[in-house]
Image: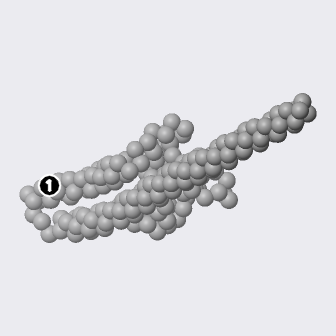
Amino acid sequence: DKENKLLKKDIEFEKGKSYYLLILALLLTFTGIVSLILFYFIRKNALTRKQLAESKATALEAKLEGQKRELTLGALSLSRNLEFINSLINELSKLSGFVTDGGIRPLNNIVKKLDRQQSNSSWKEFEKRFSEIHSNFYSRLLEEYPTLTQSEVKLCAFLKLGMNTKEICSITFQSVRAVEASRLRLRKKLNIASCDNLSMFLQKY
């Protein structure tokens, strides 16, 4: 009878042990499932945020590229307008030989005003639009290279936009040789090796 009681007690203990083990297994399984679900949603959320950030970055990059193209086209359009003004100045200058003495001075004054206006307003207009897109370019560039001249800063701005020599010639009314010489001097001043791309170097400013 005593042995039966002990056996019964052992059986009940084993049953209780099995019951608790089952509960523990269920809890561990439930915890594992919850952990997997949480991991899934955390990863999905992180992936969504990453995709959103990449999408915003792509959209911003596309917007900047569009603004750069617009600025480049605007600069080229401005250069054509300046070219027209220059041709007008030349035509007016030719007329001086056919104008009476009393009309030469007013004519020369008109020529000077046109010349002064086209040289001043062209760069100011370009600089204004350029600064709207690349607000810190000039300050950062001059902070690191304070000895750059105004013409060198202009060249840096053109190169920042990825303009080639021909386009720069159109805007500045310089020859190809003159622009290439300016690029070479700028490269030396910025201490850039000949194997490095000048336009790519200026993208960090």
Residue 107 drawn at (x, y percent): 15, 59
In the shown orientation, is residue 124 left or right of residue 5? left
Q: From the viewer's side, name the closer residue of 83 and 205.
A: 205
* Left or right side of 118 for 166: right
Tag 1 residue = 105
List the single residue furthest toward the front: 1
Q: Residue at x 51, y 54 (%)?
A: 48
| Residue drawn at 52 percent across, 50 percent down | 45
Residue 198: % across, % down: 57, 56
Q: Which corner quadrant of the image does residue 31 belong to?
A: top right
- Residue 110 occupies quadrant: bottom left
State whether residue 204 is above or below residue 77.
above
Work out which quarter of the rendered image holds the N terminus and state it. top right
Examine the rendering and report whether any part of residue 205 can be seen. yes
Q: Position of residue 112 (x, y in %)?
A: 22, 54
Q: Residue at x 64, y 46 (%)?
A: 30
Name the kind of residue labelled 1 in the image: Arg
Q: Picture coordinates of residue 37 (x, y %)? A: 58, 50
* Residue 194 vertical position relative to residue 141 in the rendered view, above or below: below
